[in-house]
Image (tube, rainbow, N blue to C red):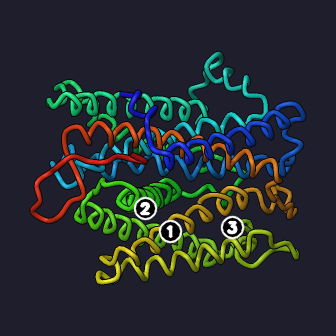
Amino acid sequence: MIENALTGSKRYWTWVGFLLVVIFIGFLFYLRQFHEGLGITGLSRDITWGFYIAQLTFLVGVAASAVMVVLPYYLHNYKAFGKITILGEFLAIGSVVMCVLFVVVDLGQPFRAFNLFLYPTPNSMLFWDTIVLSGYLILNALISVVTLSAERKGIAPPNWIRPVIIFSIPWAVSIHTVTAFLYAGLGARPFWMTAVLAPRFLASAFAAGPALLILLCLLLRKITKFNAGDEPIRKLSVIVTYAMIVNVFLVLMEFFTAFYSSIPEHTAHFKYMYFGLDGKANLVPWMWTSVVLSIAALALLIVPKWRRNFKLLTVACFAVFIGLWIDKGLGLIVTGFVPTVLGEVVEYAPTFPEIMITIAIYAVGALIVTVFYKVALTVRGEIIYDRIKPGAKPQSVETIGS
């Protein structure tokens, strides 16, 4: 099947070439980091997790969100998600690969990653995070290959794959729960040590991931003849709406707990995020941008008439994705270190090499998703699907870039 990725139009190869150039430039910056160490990043003794781990945290959620299409389709037989389930699984694979790469670049010396396996420590959340992420990657790869191969042959998937698919649903929830435990288990970081961190992670994941999937479906509709149909997109938009409402509710609960208790160690982090502390306010414009985007997104999503308008839905999904990328990324990770355990306000800002390496890793993810989507839509084009009109029969399809 992979041979389908080796053919395509000029537009397809231009996009692939662009991604490869971005990856190569980012790799050059990584070689510099590998040679000189993490000193070329904005990380320091006081802030040891920054831009890289922020992306890891956010993307684990995007990966876990595949369950939002897998669960209704396979567990509740919701056929409308039939066309987009494989897209969600491939998006999960690309996201997990990016997560692994962000861990590797954050380590500085990538060979240190082998210590996780050479000296396993079951009482470490990082050890379990490695296990669940690796397992989730294998599960999604296996499910995608088996179901797509069966679809290519025009036969039903083998019976043994169904228990694997069902097993992948709680596994998807576990990857983001364990990621939340990485932070919530740190007693010296009161900003993270909250019982609602895992539910908040899941709620934000189930908003950001489906929002990205909606954007990809709408993009595919524009550049190819593949059409996921209006019903699954509208159903996904409802999922995004409720997940976003729950996420905002949990964030407001954090505010209430911190400020009603008036415990300085708790309120200082929130003050730094939204108002600045001791004259230092690197995150303030970012966090208020996130707030504005979240409010705008909720306004567009809650009103059914606006949510059903695909142009407004596109704006809303962008707002959800970017708003949560800021809030759950730099906002959540950096603020956990500011102020420090000694009460000092030490700021962090990603350096140019950090940003370039990060962009390159996102390019790797985009390349994986592009190639897999090309393969999936080409395979499906041999047997089914075209631009859908209500009541129309399936016809042949033109795939990405062809």
Describe the element under mark 3 as helix, strand or loop: helix
Residue 318, numbered label: 1
Q: Quadrant of residue 173?
A: top left
Give whichever of discs 1 and 3 has the lower sequence position. Answer: 3
Name of the residue lying farthest toward the front: 10
304 shown above or below 115: below
Locate residue 264, reporting x and y percent: 74, 71
Identify the residue at horizontal 38%, vertical 65% (top origin). Answer: 240
Of the two numbered discs 3 and 2 in the rendering, the one whose residue sits closer to the viewer: 2
Label 2–label 1 contact, CB within 8 A: yes
Dot 3 amino acid type: His
97 shown above or below 188: above
Label 1–label 3 contact, CB within 8 A: no
Q: Is residue 319 left or right of residue 395?
A: right
The residue indicated by pointer 2 is: 215
Dot 1 amino acid type: Phe
Q: Decide: few, some or many residues near mark 3? Use Cα within 10 Å; few <14, some 14-19, many ≥20.
A: many
Locate residue 282, reporting x and y percent: 80, 69
